[in-house]
Image (cartoon, rainbow, N blue to C red):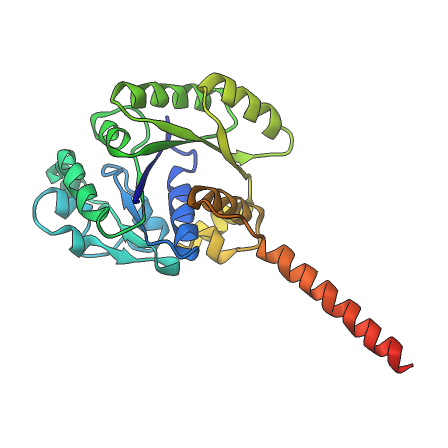
Amino acid sequence: MVKVYTIASGKGGTGKTTTSANLGTCLAELGKETYIMDADMGMANLGIILGMEDVPITLHEVLSGKAKVTEAVYEGPCGVKVVPSGISLKGFQNADPDRLRDVMRELIGKCEYLLIDAPAGISRDGVIPLAIADEVILIVNPELSSMVDALKTKILTELVGGKVKGAILTRATMENTEVSKQKMEEVLGVKVIGIVPEDPNTRRAAAHKTPIVIKYPESDAARAYRRIAANLAGTTYKDETEFVRSKETFIDRLARSIFKGKK
């Protein structure tokens, strides 16, 4: 069955688009046919962080009736399919968000997972992605204001008939991770399904317009995104780095054993 997740947050700057790009890439890496759609039509960033800011046709043209959905699909890292929104204000003005349901219906016939990068905050454009998804994933920072805004988003989701799967805590540090996790689950009333640590490589990867799971695959944040994606896909997370380390250790031991036998 196709699973549609809307990635949402109560305010901007929480890492919502970064999470969408990396989770989508990880799911594709797991062999899942995955699409990411940028429904943040006014402040679109997905195309920018994936180096697709200059593509000729975007979701804006689709929602204005000037192009077909298939014309706005581009291939990203690991084969993930991306439907970016445009960055022009004129395109945003011409786009009709009510057409999102039709776009989603067409896309779900082509994939296993559809991630919708929703606009931050509470607005008409932001309500539709919350209502049309199977489940909503909240992106929250370890700050009280972020948790309060996420709670508003959760309440709005339920008001429009949507369902919240859980929350992902981003930009976490050793000092506040456990406290924030407990507080978040109490305040939001949902489980924390993943914790992504504060990682300087996240910004470095963004500067290269490449997901951190591709640019810095051994980083702490990359491992966190892979763990969350594996959970969403219902598979067991395997840390390839640890596998390589254990393999090297085995080879070293084998080499020592061979050389010892020759003495």
Residue situated in front as seen by the camera: 68 or 259: 259
Residue 150 location (% of width, % of height): 40, 23
- Horizontal side, residue 24 vs residue 110: left or right: right
The structure residue drawn at horizontal position 16% and vertical position 44%, both measured from the top left corner, is: 60
Q: Is residue 62 above or below residue 215?
A: above
Where is the N terminus found, in terms of image quarters?
A: top left
Measured as percent of width and height from the top left, residue 236 is found at: 53, 48
Residue that appears at 28% across and 51% down? 111
Residue 218 rendering spot, x and y as whole percentages: 57, 54
Query: What is the number of callouts on the image?
Result: 0
What residue appears at the point 39 percent right and 37 percent down from the top-left corner? 16
- Hey, which quadrant is residue 77 in on the image? bottom left
Q: Is residue 39 above or below residue 206?
A: above
Q: Image height check: is 36 above or below 180?
A: below
Image quarter hosting the C terminus: bottom right
Using the rendered view, name the quadrant where residue 135 is placed.
Answer: top left
Residue extending farthest front:
1
Residue 108 in sight here: yes
Q: Residue furthest bottom?
A: 262
Of all residues shown, which one is farthest toward the right? 263
> Within the image, what quadrant is residue 118 found in?
top left
Could you tell whether 194 is left or right of 245 in the image? left
Does 198 sit left or right of 15 as displayed?
A: right
Q: Where is residue 198 in the image (x, y as percent from the top left)?
A: 55, 39
* Residue 176 visible to an observer of this rendering: no
